[in-house]
Image: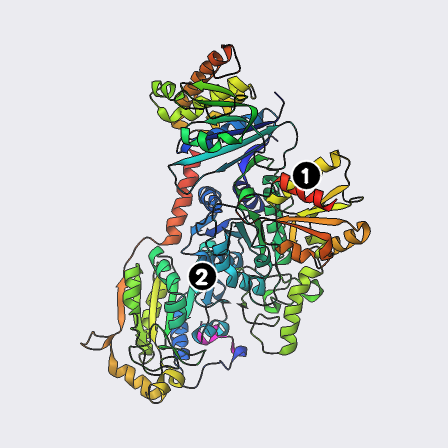
């Protein structure tokens, strides 16, 4: 299938601002999916609340737009009830790392097969520009008019520490690289988290005088590295390990219990 | 069938499994924990799923997810956890996903009195989530009723595509009585769409008011959202569509009150005094009502099995016919009595309230009865 | 005695007072009685005073708690001091021989038994709760031995079934000896 076949074209135009990177994340995801053998009936896309989470509505799968921060436990219920579904979570930096941070670390700990794509634009866009747990120190936001004194999470390290068996970071400035790592995340039999650096020219960019969307993409090019250059934000796959997956573990437990009953 | 001696919380598990529940996600909390423990023991053997989640928010989210995938699902909690669940309870009401939430009530507010009974969640069970929303709340008072009403909760949930709350206090949850676990109760399952996927509009209900939601993965691809949505499930800003949705969500319950409202009326026809109760206070009222009748006093009793929608028509008719005095015992400052006072004049209601963690005793109710007569 | 029994079994948390109540209630249910069993305990899992209440009647039961306790087992001094006052006039009390019940009113029939000494002889002090059920049932005659044995089998951990059944038998023996002594209105 072509990736455009996965779109609900009648739901266009989307709500995202001109220059927003979210469409680029979405197309990388869909291109990666299109190269694989998933029937759309067997794909479920779950999202929370925020700009990124509106993505689910544009996709011609089983789509669920849930409450703020809770996409992962909703997705967990769907996956456990129907393990044959490919379950993908589309979420933002506020949705996944602030209000939903607890669910993120626990899903990572369980190693349940969910592909979690975090659209990290360093800001709450839907509510028009408040700082998030991924807003860098001393950057500006409507709720940090004198600079953000918080320190941000390193989401990659957080997920790794929580036990995620696949952790990667990409950027909208590197769409081919992004498509590749999302694809590998989709192929991964376990919990996968892909943080995507994406631009919000409307709020984060404007507030922090970062220029146009093109300027912000250039900033990404100048400040990230897929080859581990000193002083740059590293992009790539940081964890990729085969570990027992949660649904499989549960299935094994059910089998063991059933056999135990049978031998009584 | 011989009776088994089991706890209310055990009966809840047995009822859920008999109703076809095969998914439980929960978080430990007194006095509901036995439900999670028993589910953890029993579900794997049935091929079902038990998950202990990181909190109550995740628990209710997971069961909604499971139900969206087509599995009957339940969670169980108590006051603090029930408070945490409210947002997602509203999500289930809005998206019309059937789930059963058990709230084994304890003293509040806040951490309150974890090991003692209370009925202070009466209003929260109805109005805990923001916005006008549909919900059904059932209230067993004995272990047998816990079993029966748990099955009813699943049936109503599947029939009306609505979250159902099963509300019973710590005493009902922990006492042990002889119970018959009948395997013959009618089991209702949600309707599957009649139209082919290409013509499917998940929230197009016609006159029936109740949507036919296909399980995720069954070939019907659609969108489900907590945003105000149209018949296709997609967000809408159209005022008429929003109005229709909110009204339909209310109507699907209100227009089926006859079916949903369940109660027991004992010796009410000629009663001059009527006890109105549910939960553990009902047990005291039952004893006193029986004693009073034995003495020849015209005392009746109405036991509420459905708390919400509230049976105002029953109280209005009963009062109009009997002009009776009502005695309303409850383990709260008067939430039930306040609601009842919309149908029965306040000066005809005697309140018996207790909030110290102890039960309302038959002796207390005899005293109240003397006061009325 | 009448056919309405309101029993309290109390002890220190961990002694099995609550399980003893459940076993006795289950036996009564099997014998066709209506029963309600409830419990109360403090936040501590061990120690403190815990109690199991059992209502047994041929009539329907509504209020689930004891109103007029006519039968009590107290396994510790602390639990007797705490719950003893709930025992109605003319009620029956079963306690260990080391417990002092002199504070109770004289209408109460007190059976003092070597509960813990006997349990210790079986090399398993933790079976005192089941042993006392043997005494309780012999003294009160409420349920059939068959039902009580079945209830013990159903409720104790499988690995301890034999030792618990031995305790039940030992308790019944002690109960018979106590009942055989002439009752003279005071302590036995």
Q: Is residue B253 above or below residue B325?
A: below
Whether residue B258 sits left or right of residue B164 in the image: it is right
Query: Relative to residue C168, is residue B336 depicted above or below?
Result: below
Question: Residue C173: image x %, image y %?
Answer: 45, 14
Closest to the observer, A187 or B345: B345
Left or right of residue A199: residue B164: right
Given residues B34 and C78, the one toward you in this image is C78
Few, some or many residues within 10 Å of mark 1 (<14, 14–19, 20+):
many
> Which numbered disc covers residue A75?
2
Residue B30 to residue C105: above or below? below
Query: Which type of secondary structure does the marked residue at label 1 adopt?
Result: helix
The residue depicted at 77 percent of the width and 52 percent of the height is B319
Look at 54% across and 60% down and name the residue there.
B89
Q: Is residue A175 above or below residue C73?
A: below
Q: Which residues are magenta?
A: A1-9
Q: Secondary structure at mark 2?
A: helix
Where does the image place residue C9, in percent across and percent down from the top left? 48, 29
Residue found at the very far left of the displayed protein? A230
Query: Residue B165 falls in which quadrant of the image?
Result: bottom right
Q: Residue at horizontal 69%, vertical 52%?
A: B261
| Residue that carries the numbered disc 1 in the rendered image | B288
Q: Could you tell me which quadrant the N terminus of chain C lies in?
A: top right
- Residue C175's x, y, as percent? 48, 16
Chain letter, disc 2 residue: A
Distance, label 2 to label 1, CA atoms, is 51 Å
Residue nearer the viewer, B43 or B278: B278
């Amino acid at each position: 299938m072509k990736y455009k076949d996965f779109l609900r074209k009648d739901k266009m135009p989307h709500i995202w601002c001109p220059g927003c990177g979210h469409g680029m994340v979405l197309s990388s995801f869909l291109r990666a999916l299109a190269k694989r053998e998933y029937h759309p009936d067997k794909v479920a896309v779950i999202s929370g609340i925020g700009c990124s989470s509106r993505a689910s509505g544009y996709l011609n799968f089983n789509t669920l737009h849930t409450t703020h921060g809770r996409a992962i436990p909703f997705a967990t219920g769907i996956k456990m009830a129907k393990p044959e579904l490919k379950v993908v979570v589309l979420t933002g930096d506020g949705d996944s790392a602030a209000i939903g941070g607890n669910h993120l670390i626990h899903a990572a700990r369980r190693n349940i097969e969910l592909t979690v794509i975090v659209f990290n634009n360093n800001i709450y866009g839907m509510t028009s520009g408040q700082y998030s747990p991924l807003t860098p120190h001393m950057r500006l936001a409507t709720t940090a008019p004198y600079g953000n004194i918080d320190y941000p999470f390193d989401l990659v390290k957080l997920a790794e520490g929580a036990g995620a068996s696949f952790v990667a970071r990409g950027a909208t400035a590197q769409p081919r690289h992004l498509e590749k790592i999302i694809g590998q995340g989709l192929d991964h039999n376990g919990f996968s988290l892909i943080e995507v650096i994406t631009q919000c020219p409307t709020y984060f960019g404007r507030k922090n005088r970062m220029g146009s969307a093109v300027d912000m993409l250039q900033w990404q090019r100048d400040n990230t590295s897929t080859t581990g250059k000193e002083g740059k934000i590293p992009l790539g796959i940081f964890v990729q390990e085969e570990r027992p997956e949660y649904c499989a573990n549960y299935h094994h437990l059910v089998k063991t219990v059933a056999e135990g009953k049978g031998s009584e | 069938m011989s009776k088994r001696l089991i706890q209310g919380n055990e009966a809840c598990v047995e009822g859920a499994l008999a109703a076809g529940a095969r998914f439980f996600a929960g978080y430990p909390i007194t006095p509901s924990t036995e439900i999670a423990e028993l589910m953890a023991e029993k579900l794997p053997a049935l091929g079902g799923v038990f998950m202990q989640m990181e909190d109550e928010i995740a628990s209710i989210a997971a069961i909604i997810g499971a139900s969206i995938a087509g599995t009957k699902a339940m969670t169980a909690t108590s006051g603090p956890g029930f408070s945490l669940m409210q947002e997602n309870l509203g999500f289930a009401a809005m998206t019309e996903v059937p789930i059963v939430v058990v709230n084994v009530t304890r003293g509040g507010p806040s951490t309150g009195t974890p090991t003692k009974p209370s009925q202070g969640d009466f209003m929260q069970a109805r109005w805990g989530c923001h916005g006008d929303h549909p919900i059904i709340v059932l209230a067993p008072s004995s272990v047998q009723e816990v079993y029966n009403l748990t099955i009813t909760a699943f049936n109503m949930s599947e029939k009306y595509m609505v979250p159902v709350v099963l509300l019973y206090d710590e005493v009902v949850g922990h006492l042990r009585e002889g119970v018959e676990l009948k395997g013959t109760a009618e089991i209702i399952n949600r309707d599957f769409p009649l139209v082919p996927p290409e013509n499917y509009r998940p929230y197009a209900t016609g006159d029936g008011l109740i949507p036919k939601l296909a399980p995720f993965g069954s070939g019907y691809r659609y969108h489900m959202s907590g945003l105000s949505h149209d018949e296709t499930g997609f967000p809408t800003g159209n005022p008429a569509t929003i109005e229709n949705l909110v009204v339909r969500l209310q109507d699907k319950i209100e227009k089926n009150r006859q079916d949903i409202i369940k109660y027991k009326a004992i010796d009410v026809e000629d009663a001059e005094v009527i006890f109105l109760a549910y939960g553990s206070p009902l047990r005291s009222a039952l004893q006193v009502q029986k004693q009073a009748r034995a003495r020849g006093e015209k005392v009746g009793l109405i036991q509420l099995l459905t708390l919400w929608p509230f049976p105002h028509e029953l109280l209005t008719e009963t009062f109009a016919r009997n002009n009776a005095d009502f005695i309303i015992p409850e383990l709260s400052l008067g939430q039930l009595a306040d609601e009842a006072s919309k149908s029965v004049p306040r000066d005809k209601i005697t309140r018996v309230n207790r909030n110290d963690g102890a039960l309302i005793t038959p002796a207390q109710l005899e005293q109240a009865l003397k006061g009325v007569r | 005695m009448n056919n309405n029994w309101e029993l309290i079994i109390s002890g220190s948390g961990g002694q099995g007072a609550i399980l003893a109540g459940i076993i006795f209630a289950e036996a009564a249910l099997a014998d066709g009685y209506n029963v309600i069993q409830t419990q109360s305990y403090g936040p501590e899992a061990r120690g403190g005073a815990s109690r199991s209440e059992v209502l047994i009647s041929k009539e329907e039961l509504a209020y689930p708690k004891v109103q007029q306790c006519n039968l009590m087992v107290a396994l510790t001094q602390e639990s007797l001091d705490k719950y003893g006052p709930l025992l109605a006039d003319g009620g029956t009390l079963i306690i260990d021989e080391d417990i002092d019940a002199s504070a109770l009113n004289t209408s109460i029939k007190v059976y003092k038994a070597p509960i813990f000494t006997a349990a210790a002889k079986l090399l398993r002090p933790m079976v005192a709760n089941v042993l006392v059920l043997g005494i309780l049932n012999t003294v009160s005659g409420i349920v059939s031995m068959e039902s009580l044995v079945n209830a013990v089998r159903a409720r104790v951990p499988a690995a301890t079934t034999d030792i618990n059944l031995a305790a039940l038998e030992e308790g019944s023996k002690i109960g018979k000896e106590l009942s055989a002594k002439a009752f003279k209105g005071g302590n036995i």
